[in-house]
Image (tube, rainbow, N blue to C red):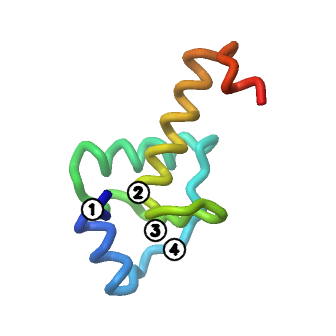
Amino acid sequence: MLIPREIARSNSLGSKKPDTRFDLQNKDHRQWFATFLATGSCRYCPVQFTVYGQAGNPFGVMQRMLLEYYAAQEFPSSPANDT
């Protein structure tokens, strides 16, 4: 998967936004990521998200994290959530 141009550009130029670990429990973080998905631009996000301890590009990792978060809410008794 390719890294969206906006994320690649902000990382390569050295963003002036503070680095912030992406936190699924933080509603603002989820909203900023949803806005990024809707607009295709990072300019509406006041922070530069980082993801620690996860392999892959940050955009893909955040998407996977959100998918798992919302799937667990939708299907709380799923066998995958019992581990």
Asked if the residue at tag 2 contacts the one at tag 1, i.e. Cβ–Cβ closer than 8 Å, the answer is: yes
Neighbourhood count class around disc 3 (C-alpha, 10 Å): few under 14, some 14–19, many 20 upward: some
SS class, disc 1: loop
Q: Amino acid at mark 1?
A: Pro
Mark 4 lies on residue: 18
Q: Name the foreground residue: 62 vs 2.
A: 2
- For label 2, the crowd category at 10 Å Cα-Cα, with few meaning under 14, some 14 to 19 and many 20 or more, is some
Would you say the residues marked 1 and 3 are in contact, meaning their CB atoms lie under 8 Å apart? no
Q: Which residue type does callout 3 highlight?
A: Gln
Which residue is labeled 3 in the image?
48
In terms of image quadrants, where is residue 5? Answer: bottom left
Q: Is residue 13 left or right of residue 71?
A: left
Residue 23 in the image: state x and y as whole percent. Answer: 61, 50
At x 44%, y 45%, the residue is 63
Question: What amino acid does circle 2 point to?
Answer: Phe
Against 49, is 61 above or below?
above
Q: CA distance from mark 4 to mark 2?
A: 17 Å
Task: For marks 4 and 2, give the one nearer the viewer.
Answer: 2
Dot 1 alpha-carbon crowd within 10 angstroms: few under 14, some 14 to 19, many 20 or more: some
Return the disc, 4 or 1, that comes first in the chain's sequence.
1
For the view shown, which residue lies furthest in the right direction? 83
**Which-is-in-front pick, marks 4 and 1?**
1
Q: Earlier in the sequence, mark 2 or mark 3?
A: 3
- The answer to whether 73 appears left or right of 41 in the picture is right
Closer to the chain start, of discs 4 and 3, is 4
Tag 1 residue:
4
Q: Residue 71 appears in which quarter of the rendering? A: top right
Q: Which mark is residue 77?
A: none
Question: Where does label 2 land, which residue?
Answer: 59
Q: CA distance from mark 4 to mark 1?
A: 20 Å
Q: Do the residues bearing badges 4 and 3 touch, measured as CB atoms within 8 Å?
A: yes
Is 79 drawn above or below residue 83 in the view shown?
above
